[in-house]
Image (cartoon, rainbow, N blue to C red):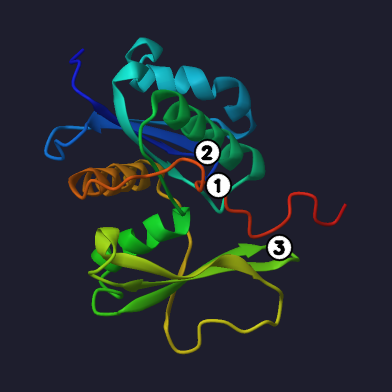
Amino acid sequence: MSSAPRLLALHSSSDTLAVAAQSLGSAATTPQVATFPLGRRLSNELLPCVESVLPAECWSQIGRLVVATGPGGFTGTRLTVVLARTLAQQLAVPLHGFSSFLLMARRLLHTDPLLAKRERVWLHQLLPRRGSVVGCYGRDPAVLGGVAELEQPRLYRPGEGWGGSDAQAAAVVEPETDALQLLELGQLAQAADLHGPWAPVLPLYPTSPVEGL
């Protein structure tokens, strides 16, 4: 395997883990990407899955990391963010976290014919008996990747209004596609020479993992 610096992306904001890697600074090169429908097995199988894409003996080649910070399952999101933070700290390389909703919004605003001319979109994920997790996103050429998070995903209780007359869409993760988006954002961060401190990258929990206990 080449000793060139690598970009590693981790996405576990659904029941399917996605891992992607690419030569850093070479966005045109073919990425390696794999998905693993692990569900609750993520805690035991995370490292072997990452190693199947980028073997542990090559982790010293990582030059930048990107990770999806959620919203997602408490355990899955936390584990991949912790792994990404640990690697970034130990290797002294940049780390960038992006919400899974932001990745969906970029995908939808670029590919959905109904949203092609819209400037902003509200994404929503229904949580039975609890309400909906909702975030708002808009086109902004000044931000990395061209789409800004206008309202961070949070829980709206049943009956609490949101969205108004703006476009709305269901928040549905596409693990492989969204992991490739992480690579794209990571390459843009590399081109812009962004610092990427690991400490501010934290999992996003719109609802409490102990709520209702």
Badge 1 amino acid: Leu
- Residue at x 55% of width, y 30% of height: 38
- In x, y percent, where is residue 158? 71, 76
Q: Are marks 1 and 2 in contact (CB under 8 Å)?
A: yes
Instruction: Look at 57% across and 47% down and name the residue there.
Output: 203
Residue at 26% x, 59% y is 145
**Marks 1 and 3: which is nearer the front?**
1
Mark number for residue 128?
Answer: 3
Residue to which mark 2 is pinned: 81
Vertical comparison of 65 with 195: above or below: above
Give the CA distance from mark 1 to mark 3.
26 Å
Residue 129 sits above or below residue 8 on the image? below
Structural distance between the alpha carbons of marks 1 and 2: 7 Å
Residue labelled with disc 1: 202
The tag earlier along the polypeptide, 1 or 3, is: 3
Name the secondary structure under disc 3: loop
Q: Position of residue 130 (x, y in %)?
A: 73, 66
Mark yes or no: residue 36 visible. Answer: no
